[in-house]
Amino acid sequence: MNWEHLLALPATVILLGAGVLVLVALVTAAGGRRHWRERRRVRGSLSALLAVIWLLLAVLSAGLGLSLRGYRRLASEMPVVTVDARILSPQRWALTLTWPDGSTRSVALAGDAFRIEAIVLKWKLPTLLAGVPPLYRLDRLDGRYDDPAQESEAPRTVIDFREAGGWDLLALRQHYPTWLPSVDTVYGSGAFLPLVDQGHYTVSLMRTGALVARPDEATAQRLDEALR
């Protein structure tokens, strides 16, 4: 069996196939019942056995389809923010943040890399497989120095994304955990990447709750050249 081809099939097609197998099982079972009424015991027994086999195949197909659908949803990503960098001076950067709704924010950052962190609320598996994405709240953006010694001594930049006095579902979960029984856990997730002039980065949240940052192709080439 070619598992790569199997995984490439849309989950809906597999679930429809499971439905067809159920219909075949019902038709076969009806034929077996008719054979029993006509006292054709051998044919009736064979039909009953085939009906059970078709039904088992339907159950396996449905389970596979649901598993594939859950896997693809877990593997998908939702965009969080894009970061465009422009160098001002060594280890000093001007960043433009763009959110999925089109709003932007310009900030100044010190360091060799940017690090972005979020608070993530992750649902329990049944809710997650049903398609409900994890909730997140961007917490902060800060600069990161390559040299740990410089990290402890050089000027630090921390950009707070929290809104003062804003209503916070994640804080509600911490104070009243029984109000959201489907919540699995609340935790922090972060990602960082080196900065280059004219760099463009995409930050996304996977349905597993992991925050990931990726440079575009041109930025990746500049990073490779900087590391040589």
Image (cartoon, rainbow, N blue to C red):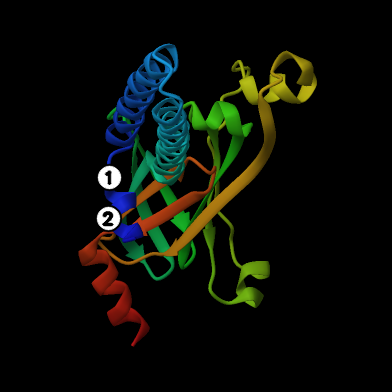
User: Where does residue 2 sit, x and y in percent of width and height?
Assistant: 31, 61
Quadrant housing the N terminus: bottom left
- Determine which residue is flagged by label 2: 5
Residue 17 lies left or right of residue 156; in this view the side is left
Query: On the rendered structure, is 104 left or right of 189?
Result: left
Where residue 5 appears, x then y in whole percent?
Answer: 27, 55
Give the position of the C terminus as an image quadrant.
bottom left
Extreme residue toward the left, this view: 218
Name the residue rendered at 32%, 56% in the picture.
85
Front in this rendered view, residue 28 or 71: 28
For this orientation, the residue located farthest to the front is 39
Q: Quadrant of residue 154?
A: bottom right
Task: Identify the element where label 2 is drawn.
Answer: helix
Identity of the residue drawn at 28% across and 69% down = 220
Nearest the viewer among 11 and 140 is 11
Which amino acid type is marked by label 2?
A: His
Q: Amino acid at mark 1?
A: Leu
Q: Is residue 84 visible?
A: no
Image coordinates for residue 157, horizontal then vertical, percent: 55, 53
Q: Residues within 10 Å of mark 1 (few under 14, many from 20)?
A: few
Residue at x-position 42% and y-position 15%: 33
Observer able to see residue 214 = yes
The numbered mark at residue 30 is none
Is residue 117 rendered to the left or right of residue 149?
A: left
Vertical side of 78 occupied by 29: above or below = above
The kind of secondary structure element at disc 1 is loop
Return the residue at label 1: 9
